Amino acid sequence: MKSALLLISCLAFLNLFGQPDKQQLEYELFNLPNVSFTNVSKPGDPFLTYDLFVRQPIDHQHPENGYFNQWVQLRHRGFDQPVVMDTHGYGMGRGRNEVEQILNANNIGVEYRFFGKSVPDSLQWEFLTIEQATADLHAISLLFKQLYRAKWFSTGISKGGQTTLYYKYFYPEDIDVAIPYVAPIDNEPEDKRIYTFLDTIGTPECRKKIFEFQQFLLKNEAKAIEKLEWYAKGAQLKFNYTGSIGKSFEYAVLEYSFSFWQWGRSCDSIPTNQNLNDYLNELLKTSGISFFSDHDIKQFAPHYYQAAQTGYYGYNIEPFRKYIKHFTTNPSAIFPPQAAKPNSFSPELYRNFKEWLDQRGNNILYIYGGIDTWSAPRVIVSDQVNSKSYLIPGAHHGNARIKNLPEAMKNEFAQKIKEWTGINCQMEVLKSK
């Protein structure tokens, strides 16, 4: 009996030791204006976890236009520890990021406005801009800098990495070091650098297999659609936005090469046996027709709306022109919400941002994948700044990560953080794949 009581006491002590500052942290959170919070910590975690909702203006320039609640997740390790602001580009999950782990840092994850739980009662699309989204992040940093006075980092993946960069551009004093992953900076609505990338990446033999795969499907479009109609019926997919399953099929075939390299598919997976079922299975695994269904287009409507402002990509139909039935010019990969007034690309924003990255974009560590299609519009670091870019050979959009940096790159990455902040990185906590 005494042994059991001693064990319970030890476990309680370890839990308290592993999750410090609870009383003080909740006192501080309670006193933050426009913040509500819920403790969602798990026993045994070496940090405290809180779901917070921060009241944000829909329009930061005119708060009288209304507010929405933005979901923020805090993982607290200590008031004296560094802080990582995880700038999500879409809805937010609950996973930990590499940067908080190697720094043993507090983490503030911020869901992107108009996604997930962070949606106003009425979607006023004109306020879904990069300026408004980064103003959300700035407002959150002002709140939490009352609690945390150590070094601040920001990080994000893909659109989240793009957000990290724009955040540092608009509010350079908020963040000491920015670490964006696989962050594209497109230079127009149809960034043609992607076409050059797809025409040159990999081996000639693999590119030929990709082209012949797409060509076969387009040449057999009628039979392919007949089969896909059964698939769509089972999956309850509708195609009112694009206009037809045939048009969505052509989108999916054109998307195939982009997605193939983005996600690091194997050239051995591409069928050559002229069996239509095998070709369709490979298409559905890689680009997928559901991505061009009403459900998915609606789900990503906020992303598409904003992509019109910051740039995106399209599909080059020239190699397939004699087989294409639904397009006479290159279609865009942007599917803006039909209820919104059209948004437009801002060349002035791009020029000013690019100039800042080249001339004043310091203390940024970029991570890209060598075969990731999104590396085509990557940031090329100029010699006027101290920032560094790490292009990981053979890595794609899903595994271009710190843990997979070659050893020399990993050592330099850690040294840069030490040089800029005085903090030693704990690289050993990451396991490569």
Image: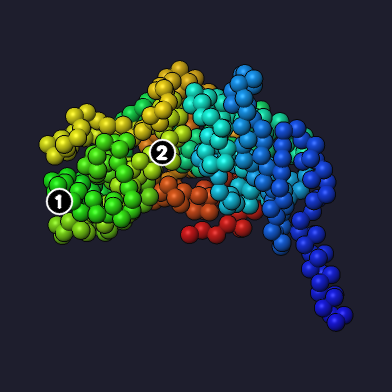
Image position of 145 with respect to 348: above or below: below
- Using residue 429 as the reference point, say whether residue 356 is left or right of it: left
Nearer to me, 425 or 261: 261
Please tell me the numbered disc located at residue 352: none
Q: Which residue is mark 2?
A: 298
Q: Within 10 angstroms of label 1, few (less than 14), some, or many (20 or more) residues?
A: few
Q: Residue at x 26, y 57 (%)?
A: 281
Image coordinates for residue 355, horizontal then vertical, percent: 49, 21
Q: Residue at x 72, y 33 (%)?
A: 34
Q: Amino acid at mark 1?
A: Lys
Q: Which residue is identified by label 1?
A: 223
Left or right: where 36 falls relative to 409? right
Residues 150 and 349: in front is 349
- Asked whether, in this view, residue 231 is left or right of residue 221, the answer is right
Say which amino acid is labelled 2: Lys
Q: Position of residue 366 (x, y in %)?
A: 51, 39
